[in-house]
Amino acid sequence: MNIIVCKDYDDMSKKAADLVISNMVEKPQIKLGLATGSTPIGLYQNLIKASDEGEISFRYARSVNLDEYVGIDPTNDQSYQYFMNENLFNHVKFDEGATKLPHAPEADEKYCKEYDAYLDEFGQRDIQILGIGPNGHLAFNEPSDKLNRRTSIVKLSEETIEANSRFFESREDVPKYAISMGMADVFNAKTLILLASGKNKHEAVKRLIEEDTIYPGLPASFLTLHPNAYVFVDEDAYRG
Ligand code: F6R
């Protein structure tokens, strides 16, 4: 696992984006795994800039996303689809149908099977971008005594509901369930790029870096098994 300590959020976003950009220049038909949440916004802004300046093109790129809330319409401004449109898709030129998020109008396993089938057809990603929850979750694979290998409907932990309530009017408005890629698919990428910024991520980052064990109580710990994982952290997340 390569740990890159960055000065601040902007430095982290730029350094991580440079890695994505160099991969996109090398392979225009790149397969990307994308994440939502506040952390990758700066990275996406750097990709938009590189695309505007003609350094990269999304014309032949394809993407899949990690997760989505259950029961939220993709046009709802709290949906992850809306987030991706606002923060990346509306600003770069992906081909029609080249991007995909999981979607579950209700908590039914059939939507998980549909997404698994899509992921199987999509195949291994070149790059998977990841954030980390303050509790060490990856995508919405919450700390537990066991983790799902494939896509599942997940009950969000109280900690995650609390952390994500900042995006909603009240805590009660945060959906209780999400549809999330499972651990086997999260790691099915040649390169993993995990971003962590801010003091509230310090505890999770410290455990990820310092503990020499892997266990489902810290989903991010499985990152240490991947042969090509990069962890970009800013000083606040690294030192607390
Ligand atoms: C989002 C996702 C989540 C977030 C994590 C951190 O697609 O999979 O695991 O990466 O909750 O979120 P932020 O970046 O908002 O702190």
Image: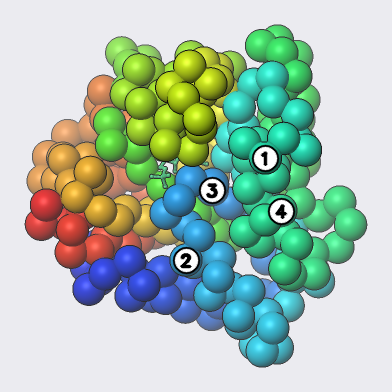
Which amino acid, by three-letter code, is at mark 4?
Answer: Asn
Q: Position of residue 138 (x, y in %)?
A: 41, 37
Q: CA distance from mark 4 to mark 3?
A: 12 Å
Q: Earlier in the sequence, mark 2 or mark 1?
A: 2
Farthest top residue? 108
Apparent side of residue 57 relative to residue 2 in the rendered image (left or right): right
Q: Kindly check if marks 4 and 1 are in contact, taking CB atoms under 8 A apart as contact.
A: no
Q: CA distance from mark 2 to mark 3?
A: 12 Å
Density class for disc 1 (Cα within 10 Å; few <14, some 14-19, many ≥20) is: few
In space, the residues marked 3 and 1 are separated at their CA atoms by: 16 Å
Within-10-Å neighbours for mark 3: few <14, some 14–19, many 20+: many
Quadrant location of residue 12? Answer: bottom left
Q: Earlier in the sequence, mark 4 or mark 1?
A: 1
User: At label 3, which amino acid type do we have?
Assistant: Ala
| Sooner in the amino-acid sequence: mark 3 or mark 1 | 3
Residue at numbered disc 3: 35
User: Which label is found at residue 77?
Assistant: 1
Q: Position of residue 82 (x, y in %)?
A: 69, 45
Expressed as whole percent of the image width and height from the top left, the position of residue 87 reads 62, 59
Q: Residue furthest right?
A: 96
Kind of element beneath mark 2:
helix
Q: Is residue 71 left or right of residue 14?
A: right
Q: Name the secondary structure under disc 1.
A: loop
Figure check: 119 above or below 72: below
